[in-house]
Image (cartoon, helix red, strand yellow):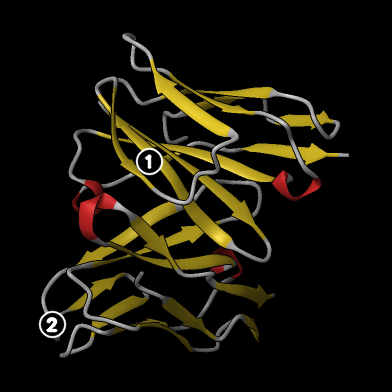
Amino acid sequence: DSGVTQTPKHLITATGQRVTLRCSPRSGDLSVYWYQQSLDQGLQFLIQYYNGEERAKGNILERFSAQQFPDLHSELNLSSLELGDSALYFCASSEGGQGLWETQYFGPGTRLLVL
Amino acid sequence: TQLLEQSPQFLSIQEGENLTVYCNSSSVFSSLQWYRQEPGEGPVLLVTVVTGGEVKKLKRLTFQFGDARKDSSLHITAAQPGDTGLYLCTEGGSNYKLTFGKGTLLTVNP
């Protein structure tokens, strides 16, 4: 158990819909990262927040948005969903905002299926 | 954008065999991490290598960082079924934009 929690574990929805994925980081960690993992693209970095502020942005679509709240939990919002958005979405956390130089602890993921 | 190529993509071996998987970059790594992802779980950090030529050992796992810092290898001795998983390498590029390889999916059969 990494200490990072993600809800829900599974999510099935239809094209065009909007969903929210939730992540609670390890106690004391200030950074939260979101990743998308699919068979063809592998693990793709989406976005990082550090203590409530956006720190880095990767291959995140404009239809996707995220935020980190004062209690440090984070939400990833996916809207106008398409079939190709079906994937595993991981949240990770680390102590500070140093990216690769820190150990990232990954949650168990949310499996999203868009029908 | 830095590209990370991992090989082989798939590897299926018998318990007790040795194996090596590779991670190669189109440019120099500032540092590199290896993660293992077991089925149904998130990735777990195995090691961070920073210095060219560096070798780190973690029980039966040996990690090597190339002298030119453009490649890395992971060698497993006497593989066990518990080693089964997806092995990912990653490098943090500029501005903390993390890049992962697609991984090597290792299956160790009893």
Q: Chain of mark 1?
A: A
Q: Splitting the image into 4 quarters, where does residue B27 fall?
A: bottom left
Helix or strand or loop: what does disc 2 sit on? loop
Q: Mark 2 touching mark 1, by CB under 8 A?
A: no
Q: Report the residue at 70% width, 45% height from top.
A: A85
> Where is residue A1 drawn, in percent x and y?
47, 35
Circle 2 Cα neighbour tier, 10 Å, few/some/many (<14 / 14–19 / ≥20): some
Considering every residue shown, the one lying at the far top of the view is A70
Q: Which residue is mark 1?
A: A105
Amino acid type of the residue tagged 2 in the rendering:
Gly
**Image mark 2: chain:** B
Residue in the foreground of this view, choosing between B74 and B103:
B103
Q: Residues within 10 Å of mark 1 (few under 14, many from 20)?
A: many
Q: Quadrant where the C terminus of chain A lies?
A: top right
The answer as to whether the residues below labels 2 and 1 share one chain is no
Q: Position of residue B94 (x, y in %)?
A: 22, 58
What residue is drawn where x is 37% and y is 13%? A69
Residue A67, given in percent of the width and then of the height, sits at: 42, 22
* Up-down relation of residue A92 to residue A44 (above or below): above
- From the viewer's perspective, tell me whether residue B32 is left or right of residue B35: left
Q: Residue at x 14, y 70 (%)?
A: B50
- In the image, residue A67 sits, relative to residue B66, either above or below, namely above
- In the image, A37 versus A55, the foreground residue is A55
Q: Residue at x 31, y 9 (%)?
A: A70
Q: Quadrant of residue A30?
A: top left
Query: Alpha carbon of mark 2 to alpha carbon of mark 1: how far?
Result: 26 Å
Q: Looking at the picture, how far across and down is residue A18, in whole percent?
A: 71, 24
Q: Which residue is mark 2?
A: B52
Q: Give the side of residue A42 with respect to residue B45, left or right.
A: right
Seen in the image, is A85 located left or right of residue B1?
right
Q: Nearer the viewer, residue B35 or A57?
A: A57
Q: Amino acid at mark 1?
A: Tyr
